[in-house]
Image: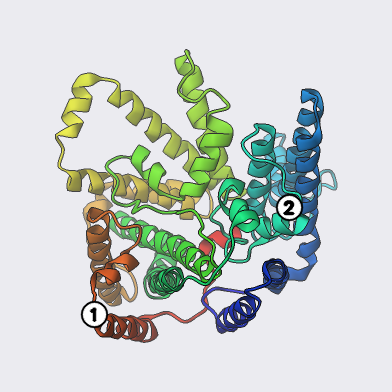
Amino acid sequence: MLFNSINFIVFLIVVFSLYWFLYKKPNAQKLLLLISSNIFYAFWDYRFLALLNLTIFIDYYCGKKIQLSTFTHIKKRYLIFSITSCLSILFIFKYFNFFIDSFRNFFSIDINSSFLPFANIILPVGISFYTFHGISYVVDIYNNKITAEKKIVNYALFVSFFPLLVAGPIERARNLLSQITEKVIYFDYALASNGLRLILIGFVKKIVLADNAAVFANEIFGFSDQYNGATMLLGGFFFAIQIYFDFSGYSDIAIGTSKLFGYELIRNFDYPYFSKNLIVFWQKWHISLSSFFRDYLYIPLGGDRVNSTLLYIRNIMVVFVLSGLWHGANYTFLLWGLFHGSIVIITKFTFKIKYLKEQLTKIPLLISYAFTFLIVILGWIIFRSENIDQVKSIYSKIFSSSTFQKPYFENGSMSYKILFLIACYFIIEFISYKKKLASPSELLLIIKNKKIRYIIYILITLAILSLGNFSENSFIYFQF
C-alpha cells in the first residue's frame, strides 16, 4: 500500500477515525494500530507477515531474558542469539544470491552448474528497517539503556507501526516505545495540524518533484550509452533530486501520519544538500541510519578514540561499506560506500592540517555547498547505475571532453518546467534552513491570518493535482 495511493488515503481515514473513537481506551487504541499495521503490511505480501512477527517474537523474548538474567554470559548469549537470528534472516532474503554469485565469479564456477544454485527468493519489504529496530532494542537492553518491555503488544507496535514499517525512520525504543508504553494519548489539534502540513509537503516532494525528476533520470540512465558526459552529469543531478525528495517525502508523510495518532518520530533529514562538506552531509542525510551505524557499530569499534591511524580508517570504512551493502546486494552499493568512506577520510585528515583547515574555512558557503553537492551527485551516479560496467562507462564520459558539450536527451525541453519547480522549492528550503525550521511546512505558521493560510493550503493542493505525476510510483527505499 503506497502512501501516494487512494488505498492509503482511505486506509488512513478509517484507522484515524476508529483510533480516536477509542480515545478513552488506550489498550484498544494500541491493539487497533497493531492490527492495522499488520493489514497495511499484508497489502504488500501477506506471506511475509509470519516473518515479521517471528523477528518481533525473537527480539521480545531475548530482550526479556537479557533483562531477567543476572549473569553477564547469559545476557550475552541471548544478545548474540537475537542479533544472529535476525541478521541471518536478513542475509538469506537479501544477500544469499549475491554471495553465491560472488563466490561463483571468484572461483570461476559455471553459472549453469548444479553446485551452489540460485534460490528464487523474494525480498520482504521493510526487512532492513524492522531488523535494525530489533537490534537496537536488544542492544540497548544489554547496555542498560532501557528496560525490556513487558507487554508484547507494545513491543510489536513499536516495530510494526505502519507509518515507519517499510522505509523508516529507524526508530529507537528510547523514543517511540517509551511513548507507546508511557505516554497518555490525547488528541492534540496543534500536533495533528503539524502532521497534516508535513503530509502535504511530503506529497509535494514525492508526486510533484521526485516523480517528475524520475522521468528524466530514468531516461538518461536507461540509455546512458547514447549520451555525452554533460548529459550523464545532468542525469546524476535529476537522480539526486529524485532520491532526496522521494525519501524525505516519505519520511515527512511517515512523521506527519504518526503525529495524527499522537506519536513523535525522530527527524530523518536536515537539509542535507546544504552541507559544506561530506562529513556534514552524513550528519544530515538519513539521520536514523547514520546514527544507528554510529551508535551500534562505529563507537563500539572504537570510533575516533583509537590510537592507531589504520584502525581509525578501518572504523570509518567498515561503517560506509556496510552502509552501502545495507542498501542492497549489488557491487554498485559496495562501491558507493567505498566512495563516500574515502571522501570522508580524506576530508577528516585534511581538517587535521591547520593551514588547509584555515583555507577551507575561507571558502564562501555557497561554493562549499555546490562542491559538496557535486561530490554527492558523483556518488549517486554509482548508486543509480545497474552495474560496475555502467559506472565505468558513465565516469569515462564525465571525466572527458564530452562533459563540456551541451547536454541533450529526448524531451529535454520539458525538463525546464521541473528545473524551475526544483529551484523554487530549494529557495523555500534555504529560507527554512536559515530560519532553523525543522521543515518548510513550518514557514506556513509564520502567516498568522488563518484564511490566508488555508488559501495557501488549497493552492498547494491544486499544484499537486495539476503538476503531480500520479503514476503511483513506488518509493525508492521500499526496495531496501
Quarter holding the C terminus? bottom right
In this view, 306 is above or below 458: above
Quadrant of residue 235 in the image?
Answer: bottom left
For the residue pair 75 and 146, the one nearer the viewer reads as 146
Quadrant of residue 85 in the image?
Answer: top right
Q: Residue at x 30, y 40 (%)?
A: 277
Residue 302 at what x, y percent from top left?
A: 53, 22
Is residue 361 found left or right of 88 in the rendered image? left
Q: Which residue is mark 2?
A: 93
Q: Say what secondary structure mark 2 lies in.
A: helix
Q: Amino acid at mark 1?
A: Asn
For the residue pair 288 and 313, the one nearer the viewer reads as 288
For the residue pair 23 and 154, the one nearer the viewer reads as 23
Q: Which residue is mark 1?
A: 449
Q: Amino acid at mark 2?
A: Phe
Looking at the image, can residue 29 be seen? yes
- Point out the tag, 1 or 2, that comes first from the N-terminus: 2
Residue 365 at what x, y percent from top left?
A: 19, 44
Q: Give the farthest residue toward the front.
A: 24
